[in-house]
Image: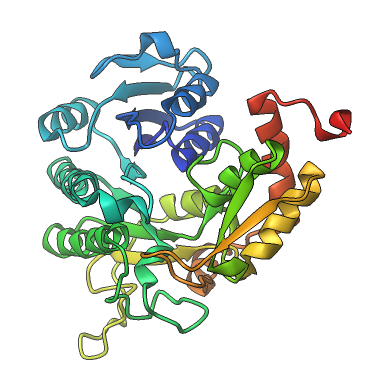
Amino acid sequence: MKILITGTAGFVGFHLVEKLLKRGDEIVGIDNINKYYDSNLKYARLEESGINRSDIEWYKEVRSRKYPNYRFVRQNLEDKAQLMALCAREQFDIIVNLAAQAGVRYSVENPDVYVQSNVVGFLNILEVSRYFKVKHLVYASSSSVYGLNETMPFSVEHNVSHPVSLYAATKKSNELMAHTYSHLYNIPTTGLRFFTVYGPWGRPDMAYFLFADSIINGKPIKVFNHGKMKRDFTYVDDIISGVISVLDRPASTDLEWDGKKPNPSSSSAPYKIYNIGNNQSVSLNRFIEAIERNLNREAIKQYFDIQDGDVPETWADIDSLHDLCGYEPSTTIEQGVEKFITWYINYKNYVPIDALV
């Protein structure tokens, strides 16, 4: 298939590109390579995919030196004219929208950025899907949409009308916008609520990355909610397997959908929502312990109350995704953290801890 993937300099986008290219799909990736976190890591991901950093310019197509069926273009989703021109030229079968302004806490202080990237940019994705009759639009939502909901595990059939951060609100708006376009224009759309993705090539603004960096440098780590925070930590390979399974199964109408008892995760339109998680809630303290074991060092912990915009716990009900494609996450916390730390030490060129003892 010919697939447009947005956000391919990002964490999940990078891994998805690698997997799809190896199975033979033709990929065009776009990313604006913004400076929300260290852009050197974004360029390093692209280099790993064969995109030479020195060749990257705005709106210039760069062909991978590693994969003949991969091309990359640096551009913004907010630039509708350029996005329309790209899609008119390429005529994609599928679009996977992973580009977004990420970060729950950052959205508290920088709301305007989220509206431009996550709302205006997503509207443009919907528009090109409409005009060029894309066969399936798959887009990243987030577990953060569950907000004040305290019923565990989080189900796609739960109400998600009480977000506690603007980031979450923009992700919920994406789901609503996608449903509107599915209803009006019969575009198959599938939203994927990711649950705390971690692993090699991950985001340095995420807690596990910050923890590893601080522990290895002997600096204190900030532990919010006094370590009682719980997250459905999901290893990136498990996320990617779920995305690809959904990608190959375009959303369809729910023949049993009832407007008098509406199921929020489906519709009379070709619209679906799924959770992709590890199907377990793990304490932040346990996650930190796994990092400490793999680094052979104890963290210096500073405890704080929960931050604005955070929720105390997440836990994904993945039954609907399992019913669709047999989805089963297979990576334990201990296995996933070990793989991350191995990559991290190599990426940072640190001397192995044992050699320092």
**In the foreground, 103 or 267:** 103
Q: Residue at x 30, y 40 (%)?
A: 93
Along the horizontal axis of the image, is 50 left or right of 26?
Answer: right
Image quadrant in which the C terminus is located: top right
**In the foreground, 40 or 253:** 40
Along the horizontal axis of the image, is 69 left or right of 336?
Answer: left
Against 288, is 134 above or below?
above
Q: Residue at x 74, y 54 (%)?
A: 290
Q: Residue at x 53, y 16 (%)?
A: 66
Along the horizontal axis of the image, is 32 left or right of 336?
Answer: left
* Colouring rule applied to residues: rainbow
> Furthest residue to the bottom?
260
> Residue 47 location, x and y as percent?
50, 19
Q: Residue at x 36, y 37 (%)?
A: 36
Along the horizontal axis of the image, is 29 left or right of 186?
Answer: right
**In the foreground, 58 or 210:** 210
Residue 183 seen by the camera: yes
> Residue 92 location, x and y as percent?
28, 35
Against 6, is 268 above or below?
below
